[in-house]
């Protein structure tokens, strides 16, 4: 399963970001192996980040998106692209991977 985690940094010791669509980084894992660490191009800017992030996640073939808190637009957009999502906060990326 391909999973994207909204993160404050670009490694396993980074905290899960509470601002899903505005997270500084997205870490993409497949079978618990990092396949991509990408800087979020929508971390700073105007409205509409949720729709744009969902589009990128669909292009990256993400099946599950994990963040501390998802906005309503991001939830709607992920649902529209058939991407599952989960809110989880106060943890490191490594904690999330251990739980999967």
Image: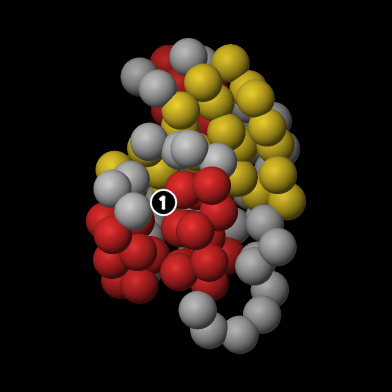
Image quadrant containing the C terminus:
top left
Number of residues whose C-alpha sits closer than 10 Å to that of mark 1, classed few (under 14), some (14–19) or many (20 or more): many
Q: Is residue 21 above or below residue 94?
A: below
Residue 9 vs residue 84, the one in the foreground:
84
> Residue 18: horizontal and vertical position, in percent?
47, 56
Q: Residue placed farthest to the bottom in the image?
A: 46
> Residue 52: horizontal and vertical position, in percent?
53, 67
Residue 17 vs residue 36, the one in the foreground:
36
User: Please, what secondary structure does the residue beneath circle 1 have?
Assistant: loop
Displayed quadrant of residue 54: bottom left
- Residue 83 visible within the image: yes
Residue in view at x 54 percent, y 47 percent = 59
Q: Is residue 45 above or below residue 42?
A: below
| Relative horizontal placement of residue 84, taking residue 54 as reference (left or right) | left
> Circle 1 is placed at which residue position?
68
| Relative horizontal placement of residue 76, taking residue 12 as reference (left or right) | left
> Residue 39: horizontal and vertical position, in percent?
73, 51
Residue in view at x 49 percent, y 58 percent = 55
Colour scheme of the picture: secondary structure
Image quadrant containing the N terminus:
top left
| Relative horizontal placement of residue 98, taking residue 13 as reference (left or right) | left
Q: Is residue 96 above or below residue 74?
A: above
User: Across the whole image, how many numbered discs are drawn on residues?
Assistant: 1
- Residue 6 visible within the image: no
> Residue 30: horizontal and vertical position, in percent?
51, 21
Residue in view at x 65 percent, y 66 percent = 43
Q: Is residue 37 above or below residue 46?
A: above
């Amino acid at each position: 399963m391909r999973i994207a985690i909204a993160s404050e940094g670009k490694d396993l010791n980074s905290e899960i970001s509470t601002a899903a669509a505005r997270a500084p980084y997205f870490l993409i894992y497949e079978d618990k192996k990092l396949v991509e660490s990408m800087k979020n191009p929508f971390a700073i800017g105007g409205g509409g980040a949720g729709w744009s992030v969902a589009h990128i996640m669909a292009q990256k073939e993400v099946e599950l998106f994990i963040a501390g808190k998802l906005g309503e637009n991001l939830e709607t957009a992920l649902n529209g692209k058939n991407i599952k999502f989960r809110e989880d906060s106060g943890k490191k990326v490594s904690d999330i991977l251990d739980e999967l």
